[in-house]
Structures are given as structure tokens and as C-alpha cells.
Image (spheres, rainbow, N blue to C red):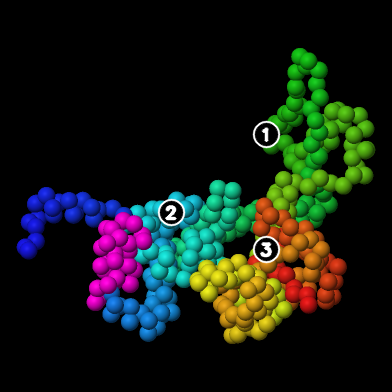
Amino acid sequence: MPKHGFMTAKAIGNRIKSKGLQKLRWFCQMCSKQCRDENGFKCHTMSESHQRMLLLVAENPHKVVDSFSEEFESTFLAQLKRTKNTLRVSANVFYNEYIADKEHLHMNATRWSTLTEFIKYLGRTGKCIVDETPKGWFLQYIDRDPETIARQKELDRRNKAEKDDETRQREAMEIMMRRDREAAAARGESLDEPVGTELVREDGQKVEFAVPLRKAAGAAVSVDAASAFKAQMKAASGSASDGSSKASSGQKRKKSALELIKEEEEAKKLAKLQRLEAEVGARAQRRDYWLTPGIVVKVVNKKVGEGKYYKAKGVVKEVIDRYGAKVKVFDPKATLTLDQDDCETVIPKAGRAVLLVNGPHVGIEATIRSIETDRFSCTVELTQGSRRGQVVADVPYEDVCKLHVD
């Protein structure tokens, strides 16, 4: 039977049906084939091309899943960078925008079973900044493009150059002031800065200034400008409040505005340097692996044992190549070989023993003091080492794990 023409009612109806998203349960990711109904999907699964694709995938299923996962991650991050850049956005909202494309790669073909698991993976690998709120998960793309980094460095260099100009001007002013003080000291004078006092006057009283008249031309001035200015300031301070000069003579000289600004900038620089050193130290002490023998973990991958061991707890018996482990599951009893991405740490109740598996105190046993569920962290008290008895606050959930007690 010949095919329908391009403008026939049958052909137009087929094109209308094929527009937009179809049901995910009738989509074959291996063949990239979308069927419109159950009968079409059944016919496709029985076709020779689908059977050949099944045989190819069965030879190395992990390689196929890894390739789908890499493609899904790259396209997801590319669209996030292109549309949102470094803007903080809701994970669910952006995922709906991503799957609006009919040709997108479906998540059920990757190693991530849920969107939450994928968002946690992006945060754990440092590709995005993620945080959980009462409104759901939010993510923010971290732009590590060389051009962006170079542009940011150039901007920082310009800002530093501007600050250097201001610093040079400030240093030049300080040098001029120091020279004036040295010249005054050589003449046996003191250029201490005058102490300002509050102007007190009655209602309606006029403010008068005594300005000395200039002598006739050619006459020598008996008092130099510095001495005259000093005498005027002493007279003004004495007339403002009786005895204030005697009371303030024993007090420490007040710092000028320039000295206060300088001290404040030095304090800011010192605080910034200490903060940067602390951040660098914390990053240097963190590791990308955390599995340790003797801790209790929870299985979070629904594909392990076809969901039979999902959310099951077990104890780590042996660590394999840092990122894998043999886990003895409690119920149902079994020994599984898992990757660290397939499990998560277990946080016990307050008062129970835990082990710090990451961070600056890695490998030290502690006791849970309190759990802050709103910040996804807890407060622990160290029970080992030279810092025994020290209380550490705001320890993330992923850095603490329950110890197995026989």
C-alpha cells in the first residue's frame, strides 16, 4: 500500500501527533525511538533492529550507561550555562525547561534514578553550588571557562591598580606630613594636632573670629605662622571651656581621620588574609573519597539488586580502591560491592558514637551533641587525639557517619 501524500489528512494527522513530548514509557533510549501508543512500542520491541541493539548493549551495559550519563550531564550543564549562566535557579524549574526539548536524553537511561540524586552529584563534584530549601533544591552554575577566568583576572588587576594609585597618594601625603613634623622638631616646635571641642553659644549670640591685621609693607613679622596658629587655637580652646586644656593635657592625643582609616584598612586586610588561609586549609584537608571500614552506610541507589536493597543499612567491611567498598547489609542479609555514589552516611541520635570521614578532623571518633536539621549539619564532641573534649559545630552530614558497635 503506498504511503499517504505529504498534504493528505493522514499525513497531517501523523505530524500533529508527533509534535511535542510523548509518554516516557513508550520511548526506547537505546534505539532513540518514540512510540505513540502501547501497540507501537510492543511492535518496536519485537523488531529485529531492537533485538540487535539489545545484543550490543548486553556485551557491555556499564559502558552504555556511562556514555548516556556523560551525555546527559554535558547537555544539562551546557543548557544551564547558556540560559542561566551563574544565576541561582530552582532545580525542578530548570529540569522542566530541559525536558521541554523533544530530543533530550532521558534520565532513566543514566546512572541517576532521581533528579535529587543528580543535583547532589553536581554539588559533590564541584560543578554547581547546590542547596536545599523548603521550596526544594536550588543550583547555581560554577563557570570555570578559561576566557571567563582570564576576564575576571584582568578585572581584578585593574581594581588592584586603582587601589595602588590610592595607596601611593596616601603614602605621599604621609611623607609630606612626616617632613613637616621633622622640620618643626628641628626648630624646637611641636606640631601636635589640635583637639577639637564642641562649639557652645547662647541663643542669638554671634560667632566672632579674631583675625590679626597685616603689618605695613616691609615690616618684619615677629611671630611665624605656626606659632600664631598655635596661639589662636590655645586661646579658642581656653575660651570655649575653662580648664579644659588642663584636663586634656594628661590625656592621650586623639588619632587623626587618616590614621583611623589606615588602621581600619590594615585590620580588614589581616582579617581577609586569615579567612583565605582558613579556606585554603579546609579545602586542602577535604578529600573526594570518604568510605572507611567500620562505619554504617545506607544504600541510596534503587538499581542495586533491582531495588531490593534500597535504603538498606550495612557496615563497611573493606574499602576497594578508595571509592568502592564491600558492605555487609543487615536486612536482608547480604554482602554487596558498592561505589561510594551508591550509598550515603548515616547520622545517629544525639549521644551516639560517630567517625569523622572527611574535613579537617578526618579519622577522629566523636560523639553527637546536637543535630541542626535546618542547616543539614551537626555539632560533635571529639573523643580522640590531642583535641579530645573539643566541640566542633556545623559539621556537614556528609563528613559524619555512625560507627558500628558489635
Label ID, residue 94: 2
Residue at left 62%, top 79%? 334
Amino acid carrying label 2: it is Phe
User: In this orientation, which residue lies closer to the viewer: 154 or 288?
Assistant: 288
Left or right of 273 in this view: 349: right
In space, the residues marked 3 and 1 are separated at their CA atoms by 82 Å
Q: For mark 1, does the 10 Å Cα neighbourhood hold few (<14), some (14 to 19), or many (20 or more) residues?
A: few
- The x, y position of residue 9, in whole percent, is 11, 49
**Quadrant including the N terminus:** bottom left
Task: Specify the farthest residue to the top.
Answer: 204
Q: Is residue 362 magenta?
A: no
Residue ID for mark 3: 396
Which residue in the protein does label 1 denote? 217
Q: Nearer the viewer, mark 3 or mark 1?
A: 3
| Residue 270 horizontal/vertical position (percent) | 71, 61
Residue 391 sits above or below residue 294 on the image: above
**In screen coordinates, is 150 left or right of 340?**
left
Please report the bounds of the magenta region as a residue range: 22-49
**Is residue 391 at least partly visible in the picture?**
no
Q: In the displayed structure, would residue 116 be above or below residue 259?
A: below
Per the image, label 3 sits on a secondary structure element best described as strand
Mark 2–mark 1 contact, CB under 8 Å?
A: no
Residue 39 is inside the magenta segment = yes
* Residue at the image position 28 percent from the left and 58 percent from the top: 37
Viewer-nearest residue: 292 or 348: 348
The disc, 2 or 3, on the residue closer to the chain's N-terminal end is 2
